């Protein structure tokens, strides 16, 4: 019987353990220093906002692990001794393995700001971050103001969390417009406006210079790089992206770059050692995907894939078409395929865009300007069906087909107003075409009128 050890009990590591157990009787141990039991990291914000308790974020009962013969070990791994196949813990303990899966996830970026390690400075990624937030920002009386540094998805989630407790928030974003390195201009500008409507002090083109301390080693204020302005605050949230959590591998001979380097089978340069999830970095990117993807569903897919290989069915990691979803305060966002920001847009790509004149709803459809091949879609405020867009991308459909059947992809609840007719009318007007919604789409629209 082999001993399979997994460092990390996030979605990647736990998925790997579950799928190995389905196909093998080998001994499995999951190692984690964050929390003994697996929990949904994406649900942490809802605990702080009062929508659920921590135990509600645990998909499995505590008895699940012993019932399935999966051992759980709490502790910090300080070093991986690959020659002897031993994990060396910071408390002096050792644990031997036959096969090792590294699934240690991410940690918030820090860029050497003075004061970045003060009390009251935190990310929003781990359970301990939530505990720190409760300690330093339990209410508006204790926390007079919070400053968030970094304009990504985690940053806007943290802003929403703090505003749920009426805590004033200043949001420092170095870009000229929120997330404009990812979103096309109309979408980024809509989010800028939406953030400000939620009484969040959004500061664009603004960088952090320094975090200042009070006499007790706690956050007192931040200094703005461009102007020297001092903003007094009690909490600083560092949400300027994440980086793979692999510092413990510095003294090992496992090959790393930003993350743990792996091939298409998620194998490292050391036999019997694999890496999955946020900490894994592909030697060569898969299609247009990034070499490192800190996304929940890709972590789950890597866990399923590596389990197949470890159980004797060597399987390459194939993530399929890119998709993702998020919320910007009250606006739901989905993306399928590839829609780049203007600065990342390729020469052959054209965009069709529609935006509602009053509501926070818009779409951007990316297509090849020569062949009209559908490349991707962003939707804001309109829910769409993943399986339909995945099918259209696989079938290399053109933009005309997507627009004809767009209503069939709509996933909004019954009695929601549909906008496919006006979207199509705008496309026809701009392109001098006469595309018509197909009969079943028209039937669906008018049945909800």
Image (tube, rainbow, N blue to C red):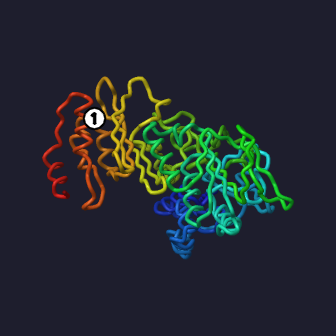
Can you give x and y, in whole percent of width and height, for residue 374 in the image?
32, 35
User: What residue do we see at 72% from left, 51% from top?
Assistant: 231
Front residue of 115 and 29: 115
Q: Is residue 46 above or below residue 61?
A: above
Residue closest to the far right: 215
Q: Which quadrant is the N terminus positioned in?
A: bottom right
Residue 99 in the figure: left or right of residue 136: left
Front residue of 263 and 237: 237
Residue 29 in the figure: left or right of residue 194: right
Can you give x and y, in whole percent of width and height, for residue 297 in the image?
47, 52
Front residue of 59 and 51: 51
Q: Is residue 320 above or below residue 31?
A: above
Task: Give the class, few, some or many, for how many residues have Cα within 10 Å of label 1's Cα (few <14, many ≥20).
Answer: many
Quick one: SS at disc 1? helix
Q: Which residue is mark 1?
A: 399
Q: Is residue 292 above or below residue 88?
A: above
Residue closest to the far bottom: 63
Residue 158: quarter of image: bottom right
Residue 89 in the figure: left or right of residue 70: right
Can you give x and y, in whole percent of width and height, for residue 174 in the image?
62, 40
Q: Which quadrant is the C terminus positioned in?
A: bottom left
Can you give x and y, in whole percent of width and height, for residue 43 in the image?
53, 63
* Residue 127 in view of the camera: yes
User: What residue do we see at 68% from left, 41% from top?
Assistant: 207
* Residue 81 in view of the camera: no
Residue 203: quarter of image: top right
Q: Is residue 239 above or below residue 398?
A: below
Residue 35: quarter of image: bottom right
């Amino acid at each position: 019987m082999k001993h399979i050890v997994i460092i990390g009990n996030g979605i990647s590591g736990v998925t790997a353990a579950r799928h190995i157990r389905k196909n093998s009787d080998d001994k499995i141990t999951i190692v984690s220093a964050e929390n003994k039991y697996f929990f949904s990291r994406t649900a942490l914000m809802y605990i702080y906002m009062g929508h659920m308790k921590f135990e509600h974020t645990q998909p499995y009962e505590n008895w699940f692990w012993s019932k399935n013969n999966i051992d759980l070990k709490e502790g910090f791994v300080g070093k991986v001794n690959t020659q002897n196949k031993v994990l060396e813990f910071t408390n002096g303990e050792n644990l031997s393995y036959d096969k090792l899966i590294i699934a240690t996830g991410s940690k918030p970026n820090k860029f050497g700001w003075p004061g970045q390690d003060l009390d009251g400075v935190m990310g929003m990624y781990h359970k301990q971050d939530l505990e720190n937030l409760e300690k330093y920002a339990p209410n508006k009386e204790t926390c007079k103001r919070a400053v968030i540094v970094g304009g990504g998805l985690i940053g806007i989630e943290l802003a929403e969390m703090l505003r749920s407790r009426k805590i004033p928030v200043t949001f420092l974003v170095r870009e000229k417009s929120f997330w404009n390195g990812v979103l096309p201009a109309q979408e980024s500008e809509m989010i800028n406006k939406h953030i400000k409507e939620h009484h969040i002090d959004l500061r664009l083109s603004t960088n952090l210079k320094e975090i200042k301390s009070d006499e007790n080693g706690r956050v007192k204020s931040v200094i703005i790089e461009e102007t020297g302005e001092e903003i007094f605050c009690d909490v600083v949230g560092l949400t300027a992206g994440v980086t793979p959590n692999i510092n413990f591998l510095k003294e090992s001979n496992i090959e790393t770059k930003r993350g743990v380097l792996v091939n298409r089978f998620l194998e490292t340069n050391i036999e019997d050692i694999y890496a999955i999830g946020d900490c894994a970095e592909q030697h060569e990117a898969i299609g247009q995907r990034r070499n490192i993807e800190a996304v929940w569903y890709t972590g789950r897919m890597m866990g399923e894939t590596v389990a197949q290989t470890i159980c004797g069915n060597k399987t390459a990691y194939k993530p399929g078409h890119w998709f993702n979803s998020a919320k910007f305060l009250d606006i739901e966002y989905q993306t399928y395929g590839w829609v780049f920001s203007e600065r990342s847009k390729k020469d052959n790509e054209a965009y069709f865009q529609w935006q509602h004149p009053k509501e926070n709803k818009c779409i951007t459809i990316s297509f090849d300007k020569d062949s009209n091949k559908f490349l991707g879609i962003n939707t804001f405020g309109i829910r769409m069906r993943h399986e339909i867009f995945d099918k259209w991308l696989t079938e290399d459909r053109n933009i005309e087909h997507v627009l004809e059947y767009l209503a069939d992809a709509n996933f909004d609840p019954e009695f929601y107003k549909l906008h496919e007719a006006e979207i199509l009318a705008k496309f026809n007007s701009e392109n001098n075409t006469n595309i018509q919604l197909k009969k079943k789409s028209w039937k669906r629209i008018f049945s909800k009128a």
